[in-house]
Amino acid sequence: MSELPPDTPCLRAILTHPEKQIADTDTIGTYLRLQRGAVQVALSPHWQRPGSHRISSSRASHRPVGRQPRRSGP
C-alpha cells in the first residue's frame, strides 16, 4: 500500500471514499435481494403448475437434498 499522509484531516478525507463505496455496495445488495425475493414470490404459483420444470410441492421430498434415507437392519 502507498504511503499515507500523517495528518488526521487528510486521513479522514481519504477514509470517506472507501466508506461510501462500502455503503453503496451494501445498499445495492439489499435492493437486489429485495428484487430477487419479489420475483421469486411472483413466480411461485408458476413453479407449481403442471408442466413446470420445477417439482411441485406435493411430489417434493421433505428430506434435505443430498442425504440418503437411513436403512433399518439387513
Image (spheres, rainbow, N blue to C red):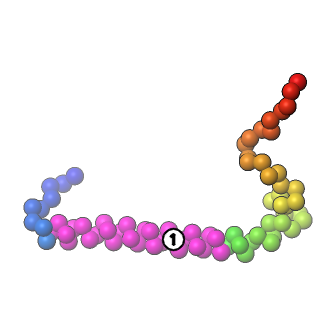
Task: Name the quadrant containing residue 40.
Answer: bottom right
Name the residue at 80% across, 59% down: 54
- Disc 1 residue type (three-letter): Thr
Q: Which residue: 73% across, 75% down?
A: 42
Find the residue positioned furthest to the top.
Answer: 74
Tag 1 secondary structure: helix
User: Is 33 placed above or below 69 here?
Assistant: below
Q: Is residue 24 left or right of residue 60?
A: left
Where residue 23 sits in the image (x, y, percent)?
38, 71
Compared across the picture, whether 67 is left or right of 49 comes to left
Q: Main secondary structure of the magenta part?
A: helix
* Residue linked to disc 1: 30
Position of 4 with respect to 38 (left or right) is left
Q: Position of residue 30 (x, y in %)?
A: 51, 71
Q: Residues within 10 Å of mark 1 (few under 14, many from 20)?
A: few
Q: Quadrant of residue 24?
A: bottom left
x 88%, y 24%: residue = 74
All told, the count of numbered labels is 1
Give the magenta part as a residue range: 10-38
The question of residue 8 being in magenta is answered with no
Of residues 68 and 71, which is closer to you in this image?
A: 71
Residue positioned most to the left: 6
| In-image side of 12 versus 36 (left or right) | left
In the rendered image, residue 44, in percent from the top left (x then y), is placed at 76, 70
- Image point (53%, 74%), residue name: 31
Give x and y (percent) for residue 4.
Answer: 15, 59
Residue 11: say if magenta.
yes
